[in-house]
Amino acid sequence: MVTGTHTQSLLGTFRCAAGGNREDCRRSRRVRHRGVLFQGRIVRHRTCTERRRIRYLPAARPHGGRAGGAVEPFSVRLINTGLAQQFIIHMKTALCAGVLCASPYILYQLFRFVSPALYDNERRYVVRMVGGGYAMFSLGVLVSDFLIFPLTFRFLGTYQVNGDVDNLITFDSYISTLVMMCLAMGVIFEISILSWLFAKLGFLSADFMRKYRKHAIVIILVVAAIITPTSNVFTLSLVALPMWVLYEMSIWIVKNSKMNEDTVAT
């Protein structure tokens, strides 16, 4: 935009160049100087305004998070690489779910088959062990399905070594990981039942478990890190804490079973 100041400056410059008097040259220099100062003020004002805008911009959000600490939803597309793969996976999943749901009836029929050969006290032990084992296994499967696997899948499904490498996760890999983690957590939740059984067989004692408690905690942390390969301490704690509680519960169960045996013996 050409203003009146710029026009006066240009006219004074032309007159001075054409041999005008000294006053025209001085006026031209004064007008140019004022224009430079005015433009400098505009530039400085714009610079300060931009600085204020940058300063009051909202802080950059952390990767994978929303403002306010909420977690952004994520989406992972599953693909199928085989013609009959989805049908086979459907049948396998239905078979596993059917066996899990029908296992109480299957165990009941097995118990009826072997119970005539057992003593009364052995029947009570079998009922406690099978009933408690099934309840703990189901609890471990539920914890894995609703808590541990979603966190693990979020980490593994969105993890990228390089941004140019896309994750293409097959449906078979998804179901296999889900079933493996559910079975692993179900077996882990059998710690207290197995400890009680080993104590009854004389292979385990409460003093032994207390003595090697620190070693057990290290093993628990390693197993939890393998099950949930994330860098998040909260996710690791969600897996390690139930296992540690089960270990402490196992010590109490083994101690009480030993005290009951001593009471019966006396």
Image (cartoon, helix red, strand yellow):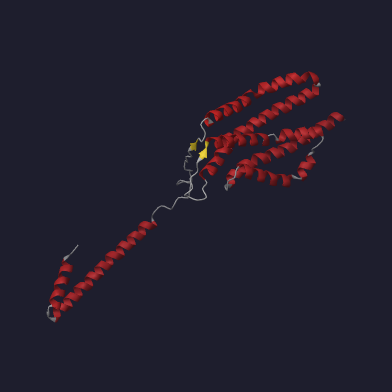
Q: Quadrant of residue 93?
A: top right
Q: Determine whether 20 is above or below 169 in the image.
A: below
- Residue at (64, 30) in percent of width and height: 138
Q: Is residue 250 left or right of residue 70?
A: right
What residue is at 33 percent from the left and 63 percent from the top?
47
On screen, 256 above or below 119? below
Q: Residue furthest right?
A: 266
The reply, left or right, for residue 36 in relation to residue 133 is left
Q: Is residue 247 above or below residue 119?
A: below
Q: Along the horizontal axis of the image, is 100 left or right of 63?
A: right
Q: How many marks?
A: 0
Which residue is the extreme one toward the bottom? 22
For residue 50, what is the image quadrant? bottom left
Residue 234, percent from left and from top: 58, 45
Q: Where's residue 227, x and y in %? A: 62, 41
Against 149, is 103 above or below?
above
Image coords of residue 117 (percent x, y): 80, 20
- Residue at position x 16%, y 66% in the image: 4
Counting from the top left corner in percent of width and height, residue 21 is at: 12, 81
* Residue situated in front as seen by the camera: 266 or 214: 214
The quadrant in which the N terminus is found is bottom left
Q: Give the quadrant of residue 220.
A: top right
Task: From the viewer's side, name the closer residue of 34 and 231.
Answer: 231
Which image quadrant: the C terminus? top right
